[in-house]
Image (cartoon, rainbow, N blue to C red):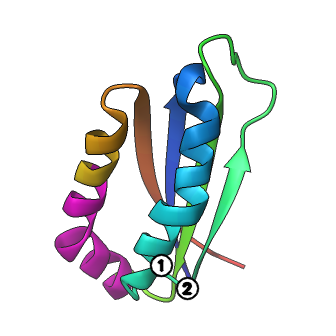
């Protein structure tokens, strides 16, 4: 199992609308690519939220090949949609992990 983790720090002003968009539009679009089986949204605690909250979204892929397919075929468009909607009101950091146990 591969986990594609996207950590996002948001501008507080877009927080409520962004969370609705994430749940109702963005995650369903990513899952619809067929590359991931599910996604989990986590909010980081005990962080400096003075400029806005931080979230981690974890997408679960059955294989590295499916993750690679997502990156090669879909990720550019998904990232562009995010920038088109929210501009520079967020920053994102991505990492890829493999489940060991």
Residue under the image location 70 percent in, 16 percent down: 48
Over which residues does the magenta segment extend? 65-79
* Residue to which mark 1 is pinned: 31
Relative to 75, 90 lies left or right: right
**Quarter of the rendering containing residue 37:** bottom right
Position in image of residue 68 (x %, y %): 28, 76
Where does the image place residue 12, in percent across and percent down from the top left?
Answer: 60, 22
Residue at x 26% of width, y 42% of height: 84
Residue position for label 2: 37
Instruction: Determine whether the residue tagged by mark 1 lies in a helix, strand or loop.
Output: helix
The answer to whether 44 is drawn above or below residue 72 in the figure is above
Residue lying at 43% horizontally and 30% vertically, measured from the top left:
90
Residue at 20% x, 59% y is 76
Q: CA distance from mark 2 to mark 1?
A: 7 Å
Badge nearest the viewer, 2 or 1:
1
Task: List x then y, in percent, for residue 56.
Answer: 61, 48
User: Where is 4 relative to 32, above or below?
Assistant: above
Quadrant that contains the N terminus = bottom right
Residue 82 point in image, percent of width and height: 34, 47
Q: Decide: few, some or many residues near mark 1? Use Cα within 10 Å; few <14, some 14-19, many ≥20.
A: some
Asked if the residue at tag 1 contacts the one at tag 2, i.e. Cβ–Cβ closer than 8 Å, the answer is: yes
**Residue 85, quarter of the rendered image:** top left
């Amino acid at each position: 199992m591969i986990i594609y983790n996207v950590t996002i720090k948001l501008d507080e002003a877009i927080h409520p609308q962004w969370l609705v968009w994430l749940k109702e539009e963005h995650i369903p679009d990513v899952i619809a690519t067929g590359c991931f089986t599910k996604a989990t949204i986590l909010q980081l605690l005990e962080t400096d939220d003075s400029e806005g909250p931080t979230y981690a979204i974890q997408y679960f892929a059955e294989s590295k090949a499916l993750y690679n397919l997502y990156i090669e075929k879909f990720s550019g468009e998904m990232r562009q949609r995010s920038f088109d909607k929210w501009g520079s009101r967020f920053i994102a950091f991505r990492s890829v992990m493999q489940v060991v146990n």
